[in-house]
Image (cartoon, grey):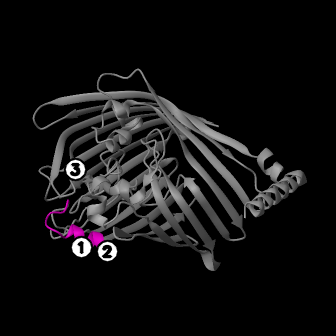
Amino acid sequence: MKKYLTLSVCAAIACASGLYADGTLADAVKNGSVSGNIKYYYINTHKEKADNTSSTSFANSIGGQLSYKTGKWMGLDATVTFMTTQPFLLPDNVDTSIIGRDNAIMAGASAGDPIGQDGFSVLGEAYLSYSRDNFDFWGGRKVIKTPLINAKEVRMLPSAVKGAHASLKLEDGFRVGVAYLDAFKQRTSSEFVNIVKHALGADTKAITGSESGVVIPLCLSWKGGKHAVRVVDYYSPDFINSIYADWNYRHKQSDELAYAFALQTIVQDSVGDADDNLAQATSVTGGKSIKSRAVAAKLNVSYSGSNFTLAYSNVFSDDASHDSLVLPWDGTPLYTNMITANNLFQSNYGKGLGADSAYIGGTSGIKIAYGQDFGKFGFSGYSMTLSSAWFDNDKFDKTQNDLNAVLAYKNGPASIALKGIWVRNSATAEADGTVSQLPILHQYRIIANYKF
C-alpha cells in the first residue's frame, strides 16, 4: 500500500510538472491580479442613558484588504484575501466596533473589553471558482452579499462565510443557485465560527440539540426588461427556515428622470428541535417559538443628479411567538434600514435572537432620504445624503427617530466620507422580547479609503 501511494504521488507530481511546463497553469499564476484597499476609520459614539449618565467612546484604526486572484486555468481560478484592522491612539473608553468587538463578545467579555481593543489580521477569503457556459461555482472562504447573510461593509472589514455555492443560468432570464454554509466570520472577529454556533452562542445545544449546524440557501431569480424577482430560502436544520423575496421595477423616463419601485417580504419559522425547545417555558425566548413576518415597500426617484427615496416597513406582531426578525449574519435587509441602530450588533456572537429598531416584532417604520450629486453644480466628485426614519411600536415608550447625514468626496480610487448620526430613543429587544430604549445616541465617523 505504501509503495502504491508513493507511486501515485510521484505520478501526480509528474502530471502537475507536465501541466506547468506546458505553460497553462504557469500562465494562470503569472497573469493573476492584485487588488485591495487601504482604509482609515475614525468613530466617535456618545450615549446618554435614562438614568442621566452618559458615555463617550472613540477609536482610530487603519487597515484594509489585499487580494490576489489567479488567471483562469481550465475554467478555474483561485482568490485569497488578507484582511487587517490596526488601531492606534486609543482613549481610555474605546469604541471597538471598528476593531475586535466580536472577539471580546466570544470571550465572554464586554464589547469594550481590552480583548476587543486588539487589532488583528485574518485570511478572510481563500476560495476556488469555476465558470463554464452558464454554470458558476465557488468553494472556500468568501465575502458574500445576500439579503440575510451579508458582508456589511459599513465598518472597517467585511464579514465572510465558509462553504460552497453553485448557480446555473437558465433560459428566459431565470437563474437558480444553492449554497452550503458551515462557518461565519463577523467583521470584528479574527475567527471563523460554526455558523449556527455564532448565532446562538452558549445556547446552541439547548436550542438545536447540537453544538453546530449549517445553513443551506436556495435562490431562484428572474430578470426581464424592467422587472426583477428574487426568492431565497435559507434553511438551517433544527434551527430556522427563513424565506426572503423581493420584486423590483425600474423605469428610465429620460436621461434626466428615472424611478424605481420595490416590494419585499420576510417569513421566518423555527424548525425541528429548535421549534420544540424554544416552546419550553424555560427557554431563552420565554417559551416562544420563532414566527416572524415582515413586509416593506420603497419608491426611488432620480432627477438630474438628485435622488429621493420613500420607504415603509412593518414587522408584524405576534405576542404568542418570538416575532422579531432573526438576523445573526449581518443581514439588515429592510428598506427602512439606517446607518446605525439598525440591528448592527445582533450579528455579534450569540446575539442572534435579539433585535434592534425596525427589526423588532410589531415595529412599523417610515424612512425618507435625499441624495445630491454636486457634479451638476461644478463640484465634481462631491455628494451628500440626508435621511431620517421613524420607528414606532406599542412596546416602545417613545417613537425612535434616526437622522443621518453623509458628505462624501470621490476622486478616482480615493474617497472620503464624513458621517453624522443622531438617534433618539434607540430601541433594542432581548431574546425574551424585553425592550429597552436609549434616550440619545450620537455618532460621528470619518472614513478615508483608497482602492487599488
Q: Earlier in the sequence, mark 3 or mark 2?
A: 2
**The magenta stretch spans residue 282:** yes
Q: Which mark is residue 448?
A: none
- Mark 2 — residue? 272
Q: What type is the residue that disc 1 sits on? A: Asp
- Quarter of the image with the C terminus is top right
Check contact, mark 1 vs mark 2: CB within 8 A.
yes
Q: Position of residue 134 (x, y in %)?
A: 68, 71
Residue at the extreme bottom: 171
Residue, disc 1: 276
Q: Secondary structure at mark 1?
A: helix
Number of numbered discs visible in the structure rendering:
3
* Displayed quadrant of residue 451: top right
Task: Look at the image and tell me whether residue 266 can be seen.
Answer: no
Distance from label 1 to label 3 (Cα)?
Answer: 26 Å
Name the residue type under label 3.
Thr
Q: Are marks 3 and 2 in contact (CB under 8 Å)?
A: no
Question: In the image, which residues are magenta?
Answer: 271-284
User: What residue is pinned by disc 3?
Assistant: 428
Image point (37%, 45%), residue name: 339
* Eye-nearest disc, 3 or 2: 2
The residue positioned 52% from the left and 32% from the top of the image is 63
Helix, strand or loop status at disc 3: strand
Q: CA distance from mark 3 to mark 2?
A: 28 Å
Instruction: Measuring from the top left, give residue 166's x and y in whole percent.
Output: 59, 68
- Indicate the position of residue 435 as horizontal and vertical percent values: 16, 52
Residue 240 visible, this orientation:
yes
Q: Where 431 falls versus 420 (above or below)? A: below
Quadrant that contains the N terminus:
bottom right
State the residue at coordinates (46%, 38%). 156
